Image (cartoon, grey):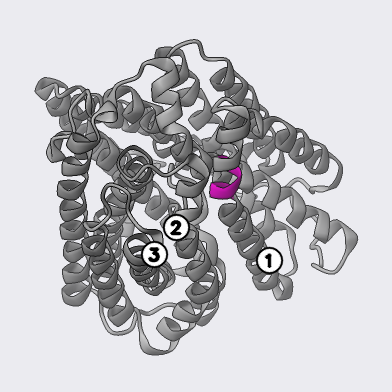
Amino acid sequence: MTAPALHLKSARGRWVVTATVLGSSLAMLDGTVVNVALPRIAEDLGAEVAGVQWTLSGYTLTLASLILLGGALGDRWGRRRVFIWGTVWFAVASGLCALAPDVTALVAARLLQGFGAALLTPGSLAIISASFEDDDQGAAIGMWSGLGGVAAAVGPLLGGWLVQVAGWRSVFLINLPLAVAVVWVSARHVPETRDPHPPERLDFAGSILAALALGALTYGLIEKTAWMSVAGIALFAAFVLVERHARYPLVPSSLFASRVFVAANLVTFAVYAALGGVFFLLLLQLQIVSGYSPLAAGVASLPITILMLLLSSRAGRWAQVHGPRIPMTVGPLLAAAGLLLMLRIGPDASYPTQVLPAVLVFGLGLAALVAPLTAAVLGSVSSDQAGIASGVNNAVARTSQLLAVAALPGLAGIGTEALTDPAAFGSGFRIAMLICAALLLIGAVISAVMIPRRTVAEEPAAEEAGESVACQPHCDVTAPAVQPPPD
């Protein structure tokens, strides 16, 4: 089914942008507000560190495992239809999160919420790409990115305020009125579109294996169960074999024939693992060790969002002209320097002298990195593979953040009682920041060695990358200010 091509200035065009921005904002707000609420959730439900890890990882697990399948379902069954299904599912799961009587019920609801996000998230950008005239697509994507960035910026403020005024359950209840608005606008104004030539079959076997592999790895890392981690690695090996021989694979092996695509995804894995760890632990550090209120902790990371909004598109345009290697090398180095400055964040940390310099340097690094990284991914494949390449890169980012949240507390020595022991948590936080800085350095080295000065991207693809990544890091993971690449 092919929808009539829309113009951005038309009334229906504006409604389509509104629906997709509101839809993506559901996932963005969930990512930015939940971290702020973690200490209160742990206190109210009696959760230890593992419970907090599962609260974040449950959502990311199902989202990372199923996001490619969600995109394929939209292409086959209708992007608007699956977008609405995902929104309704997400809203119901959010209500269950708000009603959770204990941490086990909360984690189960978060798993369901991630499944809804996997249906909802891919459709947001796909609807815009399929609905607008070619001449208006770039502007529509830019508007989607900019407004989405505003939603991400509001998230920490809104989350902190809600936690202080109405309690942690309100950060899930806020999704319900948003979901009603998304469904109403989508049903009335968004045209239905489908892929006119979808694969004959969907790769359910690959999706199941991916979910089982990530689930086993996550369980093994959080619960420190070695045999489960080994099982996860074995299941991942089985996933690779199935994908190589599948007639209609979820992840086409032809993508990895490109050295630049492989390199860009290695950088993504290293860098976004660091980001997942930083934004999992930073807000906890500010509240548990430095004594910040939820609102103050949420506001503390706001400069990162502002820098991303102001500078990401400029970095994308610079990389389009000069190539992505330099910003992909310098960006992680700057971000690593920001993490070294975060080592100074301790008890009663002063925001102007200890927190602000760290988040400013960290934010400058991210602003330099994100758009060129996406441009490198898109530029490493042919234009007809750009959609699946972006989807795979998105899944890699989410997977690395999932594993980082699962592994870092154990690696850093953050024990089960650390949430009530500021000294123990602060010691673990410093070790974790050093690990994350090392991951960023690895990303910089890979970029310097494996990313060419220029990629073979077609100009339109590079332009789209530069325009659309301004909010990329906000497009949904359990982080207060930074999210994975766009869907």
Range shown magenta: 155-159
What residue is rendered at 66% in x and 33% in y?
174
Asked whether residue 157 is drawn in magenta, I would say yes
Residue position for label 2: 390
Residue 350 visible somewhere in the drawing: yes
Instruction: Please determine whether, in this image, residue 420 is positioned above or below residue 75.
Output: above
Residue position for label 3: 356
**Callouts 3 and 1 close, C-beta under 8 Å:** no
Q: Nearer the viewer, residue 10 or 105?
A: 105
Q: Earlier in the sequence, mark 3 or mark 1?
A: 1
Q: Earlier in the sequence, mark 3 or mark 2?
A: 3
Q: Answer with the quarter of the image where residue 30 lies.
A: top right
Front: mark 3 or 2: 3
Amino acid carrying label 1: it is Met
Amino acid carrying label 2: it is Ser
* Residue 396, x across and y down, in percent: 34, 49
**SS at mark 2 in the image:** helix
Crowdedness near tag 1: few (<14), some (14–19) or many (≥20) residues, C-alpha within 10 Å: some
Q: Nearer the viewer, residue 340 or 264?
A: 340
* Residue 154, x across and y down, in percent: 61, 52
Q: Nearer the viewer, residue 169 or 226?
A: 169
* Residue 57, x across and y down, in percent: 36, 32
Structural distance between the alpha carbons of marks 2 and 1: 19 Å
Structural distance between the alpha carbons of marks 3 and 1: 29 Å
Q: Answer with the quarter of the image where residue 227 lies.
A: top left
What residue is rendered at 45% in x and 18% in y?
44
Front: mark 2 or 1: 1
Relative horizontal placement of residue 21, taking residue 185 as reference (left or right): left
Amino acid carrying label 3: it is Leu
* Residue 184, x across and y down, in percent: 82, 37
What residue is rendered at 37% in x and 16% in y?
46
